[in-house]
Image (tube, grey):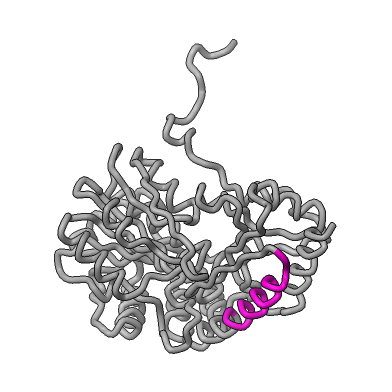
Amino acid sequence: MHSLHPVHARPAVQALANSLIREVANSGMGRSDIVPFWFGESDQTTAPFIREAAIQSLQEGETFYAQNLGRPWLRQALADYLSALHGQTMDVERLAVVNSGVSALLIAAELLLSAQDRVVAITPLWPNVCEIPKILGAEVVRVPLGVHEGRWSLDLDRLLAALTPDTRALIVNSPNNPTGWMLSEDEMTAIVQHCRRHGIWIISDDVYERLVYNPALKSAPSFLRHYQPGDRIISVNSCSKAWSMTGWRAGWMVLPPELAADAGKIIEYNFSCLFDPVQRAMAAALSRGEAEVARLRAMLGHSRQTLTGALTTLPGVEVPDSGGAMYVFFRIHGHEDSMALAKALVQAVGLGLAPGSAFGAEGQGWLRWCHAVSDDAKLLDGVGRLQRFLIA
């Protein structure tokens, strides 16, 4: 007997976009001839000293519930790390430990957003960032980046015009996934002043802040350096990228202290607490991991040069410059459907790239190539496959 009542999720959830990156990857996973560059992670395993911290924790039986906001020793290690990185004292009361950067984005949204709230996002952008507000019924207004003089750039006037007084929040990912675009200090100052004037929240996705190509910069420009008491700024971050810890699901949030108690409630109702062995690994990474970050940054600088140098020898390929992250976002003139192109590359030459349309309509016609690869030969093999596809 069939129920009289249809079985489905609520409309806001049904309307969420599926991951087009996963769709392409699923079409090629399991094939031994694929060279995959579709996911955003390094090919390096987590450093031994980080893994050993988790192993020791397990051996010592640290398998119980922890505090919602994280163990005090981890929050202190995080405060010390952020204070040193940004050159200002970071209070432990502003810190919450969460199980991944994407969980931090969801918790920030749950703290701030209601149905019909207006959220502005700088795009193209990792799809999770734009879809999370929609889970809560918020509206997402997209402000696209452009290419100016061969480099990804922001139309600041267009962004400020979109940040109307009725806007609840701005979401910024800098350095950006997928383009690698990075906010300048002057742009950041203008955004902070505008949002402060109108009471607009800033949710800053800082997961790539350490992965900048300029060796003179310790990290990307940070909204945390602009924070003053009373400001509406939340920074979300993760150990996933800079410390090669994608599978660990270890992240954190920096919030105004007024939100800490409510953040603890939301964490309780989402995942309660982070597993102690992961917290031990995270503490090891933050306190002893600078050499690992430096090693990855050097690798990324080299691999980006290798990849862009090879790509730009191909006819019709455009590769705008960028400031950081671990991606080359490029397009091939004459190929406007990025999803069809990504699937054709998988089927024809075994090259796995992410379709630009996965990051929004602004990415149509573009492809994202993750170059967090330690082996030049693998990158050059991929470029060779692309070349064979283009001349076939």
Q: Tell me which residue sits at (18%, 61%) in the image.
A: 196
Asked whether residue 59 is in view, the answer is: no
Q: In this view, does 205 lie to the left or right of 256?
A: right
291 and 322: which is toward the camera: 322
Number of numbered discs present?
0
Does the magenta segment cover residue 87? no
Name the image quarter holding the C terminus.
Answer: bottom right
Work out whether 83 lies above or below 31: below
x, y percentage for residue 206? 40, 68
Q: Tell me which residue sits at (69%, 46%) in the image.
A: 340
Question: Which span of residues is magenta-colored?
Answer: 300-315
12 and 99: which is toward the camera: 12
Does the magenta segment cover residue 311? yes
x, y percentage for residue 336? 64, 49
Q: Is residue 283 left or right of residue 257?
A: right
Work out whether 254 lies above or below 357: below
Q: Is residue 264 left or right of residue 339?
A: left
In which image quadrant can residue 368 be found?
bottom right
x, y percentage for residue 29? 74, 54
246 and 57: which is toward the camera: 246
In which image quadrant can residue 380 be found?
bottom right
Q: Is residue 268 left or right of residue 239?
A: left
From the image, give the main secondary structure of the stretch colored magenta: helix
x, y percentage for residue 153? 43, 66
Work out whether 71 lies above or below 31: below
Q: Tell me which residue sits at (47%, 56%) in the image.
A: 125
Asked whether residue 30 is in view, the answer is: yes
Name the image quarter holding the N terminus.
Answer: top right
363 and 195: which is toward the camera: 363
Q: Tell me which residue sits at (72%, 66%) in the image.
A: 315
